Image (cartoon, helix red, strand yellow):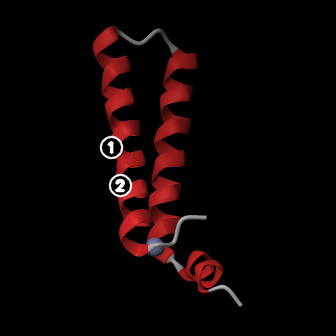
Amino acid sequence: MPRKQLAVLSCIEHERLEFELTEIRTRGRYLIRLRRLSREEQSEWDVREALALARLVDHELEHGCSG
Ligand SMILES: [Zn+2]
């Protein structure tokens, strides 16, 4: 039984970070559909998404729980 697989299944923090990233992406897309975002708003969402992704990748690297 590979330990890596077990870690993925049991890593709540990974799930939380992944959920956070999905939520930011979903909300960003929703806002874009709702109305035209200004350049500033658009880049703000890009930064938020990039930060959430970075947190997830950092966690995977530190914890070794990447799927
Ligand atoms: Zn983890």
Number of labels in the image equals 2
Name the residue rendered at 33%, 20% in the picture: 43
Question: Which quadrant is the C terminus positioned in?
Answer: bottom right
Q: Quadrant of residue 13?
A: bottom left
**Is 13 left, or right, of 6 in this rendering?**
left
Above or below: residue 20 compared with residue 32: below
Q: Which residue is drawn at the image coordinates 37% and 38% (left, top)?
A: 50
- Amino acid carrying label 1: it is Leu
* Residue at numbered disc 2: 55
56 up-or-down from 39: above or below: below
Mark 2: secondary structure: helix
Residue toward you, 40 or 5: 5
Residue beneath disc 1: 51
* Image coordinates for residue 23, horizontal then vertical, percent: 51, 46
Q: Report crowding for label 2: few under 14, some 14 to 19, many 20 or more residues within 10 A (C-alpha).
A: some
The reply to whether the C-beta atoms of the residues labelled 2 and 1 are less than 8 Å apart is: yes
Residue 16 location in percent, x, y? 47, 65
Left or right relative to 67: residue 43 = left
Residue furthest toward the front? Answer: 2
Real-space Cα separation, disc 2 to disc 1, in angstroms: 6 Å
Kindly state the secondary structure of the residue where label 1 is placed: helix
Residue with the most extreme bottom position: 1
Residue 54 image offset from top left, x and y in percent: 36, 48
**Vertical position of residue 21 compared to residue 10: above or below:** above
- Location of residue 58 in the rendering, given as x and y in whole percent from the top left corner: 35, 59
Q: Quadrant of residue 56?
A: bottom left
Q: Name the outermost residue toward the right.
A: 1
